[in-house]
């Protein structure tokens, strides 16, 4: 069994230094890894990234993050990611990381994700160039997630995104904004690649528990939802038929 701690949407500003750290100092007693599902900062500034980096650096477990829309707001996502990496965090955008943990090998593939909507009520790459670009951006990100997940050969495979891969975890959000909260294309990538757990944030008024059409557990770990420094999910290694 692998214990996966996760949280997103902590929205740390320069006045929030030290807010989470007391709850993180003993995380190794409860989890084997910590996943951060984006929106680590309020406005995506480098100074805010330094606050987040200090908060999550030098923990007893590996820390893996994706960026969120707030982390892109200052148009400096590469610099934000660099600050986090310099403090020892693994930051993913279309890549993956593998960890040899006491309960087995864990593979995490991550992307920010993007919007577009869900089956039956989604946008399509048709019409104006702006609409084609919007949906094309989502499709490209989802394909990178599919490729990164498909390349993993591990005991436990986890998908980490900021945007939601299913509508289940959006219940409570206004239906009118579902297309801006996630995309079914992310869920399709997850279902196609043998994932055991999918973690996302972004939906502050949604619910924690959901599932893909293919039966993969989905967890919305936005801090306004879980109301704690992190939640922990136990995942058993996949059973391989021979």
Image (tube, rainbow, N blue to C red):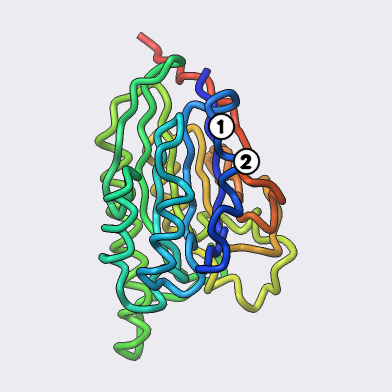
Q: Position of residue 33 (x, y in %)?
A: 46, 32
Residue 183 visible, this angle: no
Q: Position of residue 55 (x, y in %)?
A: 48, 50
Mark 1 lies on residue: 27
| Residue 98 against residue 104 in the figure, above or below | below
| Residue 233 against residue 132 in the figure, above or below | above
Mark 2 lies on residue: 23
Viewer-proximal residue among 181 and 229: 229
**Label disc, if present, on residue 227 of the rendered structure:** none
Q: Quadrant of the rendered structure where residue 176 is?
A: bottom right
Classify 10 Å Cα crowding around label 1: few (below 14), some (14-19), many (20 and above): some
Q: Quadrant of the C terminus?
A: top left
Classify 10 Å Cα crowding around label 2: few (below 14), some (14-19), many (20 and above): few
Q: Residue at x 56, y 53 (%)?
A: 18
| Residue 238 against residue 70 in the figure, above or below | above
For this view, does 77 lie left or right of residue 156? left
Q: Residue at x 31, y 31 (%)?
A: 98
Q: Position of residue 67 (x, y in %)?
A: 40, 60
Distance (Cα) linking label 2 and label 1: 7 Å
Viewer-proximal residue among 26 and 36: 26
Q: Residue at x 30, y 55 (%)?
A: 93
Q: Position of residue 56 (x, y in %)?
A: 46, 46
For mark 2, give the secondary structure. Answer: helix
For this view, does 234 lie left or right of residue 225? left
Circles 2 and 1: CB atoms closer than 8 Å:
yes
Viewer-proximal residue among 7 and 182: 7
Residue 109 visible, this angle: yes
For this view, does 199 lie left or right of residue 84? right
């Amino acid at each position: 069994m692998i214990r996966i701690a996760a949280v997103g949407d902590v929205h740390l500003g320069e006045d929030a230094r030290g807010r989470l750290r007391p709850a993180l100092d003993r995380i190794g007693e409860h989890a084997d890894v910590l996943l951060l599902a984006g929106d680590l900062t309020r406005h995506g500034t480098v100074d805010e990234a330094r606050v987040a980096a200090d908060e999550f650096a030098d923990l007893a477990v590996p820390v893996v993050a994706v960026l969120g829309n707030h982390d892109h707001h200052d148009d400096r996502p590469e610099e934000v990611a660099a600050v986090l990496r310099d403090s020892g965090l693994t930051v993913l955008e279309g890549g993956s990381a593998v960890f040899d943990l006491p309960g087995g090998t864990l593979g995490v593939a991550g992307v920010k994700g993007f919007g577009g909507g869900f089956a039956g009520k989604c946008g399509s790459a048709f019409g104006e160039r702006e609409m084609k670009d919007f949906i094309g951006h989502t499709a490209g990100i989802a394909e990178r997630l599919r490729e990164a997940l498909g390349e993993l050969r591990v005991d436990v495979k986890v998908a980490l995104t900021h945007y939601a891969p299913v509508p289940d975890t959006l219940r409570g959000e206004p239906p009118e904004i579902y297309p801006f909260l996630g995309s079914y294309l992310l869920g399709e990538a997850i279902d196609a690649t043998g994932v055991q757990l999918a973690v996302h944030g972004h939906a502050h008024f949604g619910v924690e528990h959901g599932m893909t059409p293919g039966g993969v557990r989905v967890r919305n770990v936005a801090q306004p939802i879980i109301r704690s420094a992190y939640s922990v999910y136990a995942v058993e290694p996949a059973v391989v038929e021979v």
